[in-house]
Image (cartoon, coloured by chain):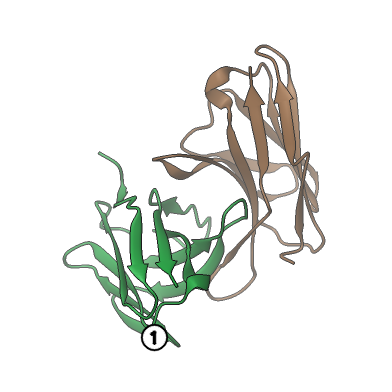
Chain colours: A brown, B green
């Protein structure tokens, strides 16, 4: 158990609807990340957070926003979902160790019709 | 051109064979190199970590980094069916914000 849970695990929605994915950690790790995984692209960083209310963009941030009002929760919002945002979304937290290992959740599979 | 290139395979080997995986990269600032293993419908998990150049061995796994060639490798000796997974290379330039750049992943199947 990586101590990080994502919800929902599966979601089907329609184009134009808002979607929020939730990531919850059981510890107080400072850094949290949202990635998306698509065939042929591997994992691409959407947004990350380095503390409560402290967030920054990754390489594929267009169409996404994030919020972190508590250390343990990191939310990813698609304001108006598009079919190109159909993907598997992974949340991760960074360990407070020399390696800075990322611990990933089980993923949220989103389908936008 | 992608910052990190990784052959997606798939790669199929018999049990007991040596699996050889590699990635090339273009950003000379990368100095933290990792290999993650991802089983089907699971999140990635860290397998090997190397800082800067050199070799690192952990059981049946060996990671190599050649910064002069911008090339990293992972070798799996005496491969087992349980090694069947997707292997992703990842790297970062700075430790502070640790924005990892991932390869596309190589899918490996070890046949019993």
Q: Which residue is mark 1?
A: B57
Q: How far from the left and from the top, in percent, is residue B99?
A: 49, 52
Q: Quadrant of the N terminus of chain A?
A: bottom right
Q: Does any portion of residue B90 appear in the rendered image?
A: no
How many numbered markers are drawn?
1
Residue visible at 40% across and 53% down in the picture: B105
Residue visible at 78% across and 39% down in the picture: A8
Q: Quadrant of the C terminus of chain A?
A: top right
Residue visible at 64% across and 27% down in the picture: A111
Give the left or right position of residue A71, taking residue B34 as reference.
Answer: right
Q: How far from the left and from the top, in percent, is residue B65?
A: 28, 72
Q: How far from the left and from the top, in percent, is residue A72?
A: 80, 53
Give the left or right position of residue B63, taking residue A63 as reference.
Answer: left
Which chain is mark 1 on? Answer: B
Q: How far from the left and from the top, in percent, is residue B104?
A: 39, 48
The foreground one among B61 and A50 is B61
Q: Residues within 10 Å of mark 1 (few under 14, many from 20)?
A: some
């Amino acid at each position: 158990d990586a101590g990080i849970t994502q919800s929902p695990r599966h979601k089907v929605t329609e184009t134009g609807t808002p979607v929020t994915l939730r990531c919850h950690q059981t510890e107080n790790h400072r850094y949290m990340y949202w990635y998306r995984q698509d065939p042929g692209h591997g994992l691409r960083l959407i947004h990350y957070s380095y503390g409560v209310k402290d967030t920054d963009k990754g390489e594929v941030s267009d169409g996404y926003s994030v919020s972190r009002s508590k250390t343990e929760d990191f939310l990813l919002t698609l304001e108006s979902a598009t079919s190109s945002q159909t993907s598997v979304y992974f949340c991760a937290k960074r360990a407070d160790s020399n390696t800075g290992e990322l611990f990933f959740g089980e993923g949220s599979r989103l389908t936008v019709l | 051109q992608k910052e990190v290139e990784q052959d997606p395979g798939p790669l199929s080997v018999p049990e007991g064979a040596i699996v050889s995986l590699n990635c090339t990269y273009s950003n000379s600032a990368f100095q933290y190199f990792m290999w993650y293993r991802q089983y089907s419908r699971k999140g990635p998990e860290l397998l090997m970590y190397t800082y800067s150049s050199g070799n690192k061995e952990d059981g049946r796994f060996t990671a190599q980094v050649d910064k002069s060639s911008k090339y990293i490798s992972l070798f799996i000796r005496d491969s087992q069916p349980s090694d069947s997974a997707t292997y992703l290379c990842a790297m970062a330039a700075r430790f502070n914000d640790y924005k990892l750049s991932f390869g596309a992943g190589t899918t490996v199947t070890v046949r019993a």
